[in-house]
Image: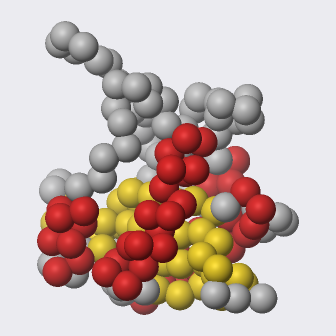
Amino acid sequence: MTVYAVEPWSDVVEEMRGLWQAHFHEVASDRERAPLDPDLEAYARLEAAGALHVLTMREGRVLAGYLVALVWPHLHHRSVSHAFFDLYYVRPAHRRWTAGIRLFREAERTLAARGVRRMMTGTKLHRAPNGRPLDVGPIFRRLGWVEMERQYGKWIGAW
C-alpha cells in the first residue's frame, strides 16, 4: 500500500540522499559542468524558517518517491503564498499507473491545507540518458496546470 505523508526535511533527508544519484543521473543535463552538490545547510535554514514542504511516498517502509517545495510569498505577489517545486521524483520501479499523479495531487492537497494558493514548477525538456522523454507537462496539464513561462539557460565564462 502506498502512503503519502508530509515529513520534516531533517527526518527524511538521509533517505532522500540515497535516491539523489539515480535522480540526478536520470534528469540532469550538463552533469560534467554542474555536478550534484546540494547545499544541505541552506535546506536546513529553509526548514528552520518553515519554508520547506516535504511530501514522501512510501511503499511500506521504503521511500518510493518525494516532492520538495519551497513555500513563501512570491516577490511580486507578497499576499499570495506560493509553492515552488524544487524536487520531485518517483523511483522507476514504483512508476506504475498513476503514482506520479497521486504524488502531485497529494502535494496540492497538503499545500492547500498549509495556505498555499499557487503552485509553480518546471519540467525537463531533454531526454534521459536511456532516451526516455523527461517532459511531464502532459501530467501537469491533466491535473489542471497551465504553462506560464519558459526558462532558458546559457553557460557563460570560462569552463
Residue 88 rendering spot, x and y as whole percentages: 52, 60
**Depth check, front residue: 134 or 150:** 134
The colouring scheme, among rainbow, by chain, secondary structure or one colour, is: secondary structure
Front position in the image: 116 or 13 = 13
- Answer above or below: position of 156 versus 53: above
Count of numbered circles on the image: 0
- Image check: 78 left or right of 15? left
Q: Position of residue 45 (x, y in %)?
A: 15, 71
Return the x and y of residue 23 as percentages of the image width and height: 55, 51
Task: Left or right? Give the position of 46 relative to 87.
Answer: left
Image-quadrant location for residue 124: top right
Residue at 59 percent across and 28 percent down: it is 126
Locate the C terminus and report the quarter of the image it occupies.
Answer: top left
Rendered residue at 34%/32% (across/down): 34
* Image quadrant where residue 13 sits: bottom left
* Vertical order, 150 against 73 (above or below): above
Q: Position of residue 104 (x, y in %)?
A: 59, 69
The quadrant of the image that shows the N terminus is bottom right
Q: Is residue 147 visible?
A: no
- Can you name the residue that lies furthest to the top here? 158
Which residue corresponds to the image point at 44% horizontal and 64% vertical from the top-left? 17
- Can residue 69 be seen in this snapshot? yes
Q: Residue furthest right?
A: 97
- The residue shown at (64%, 87%) is 61
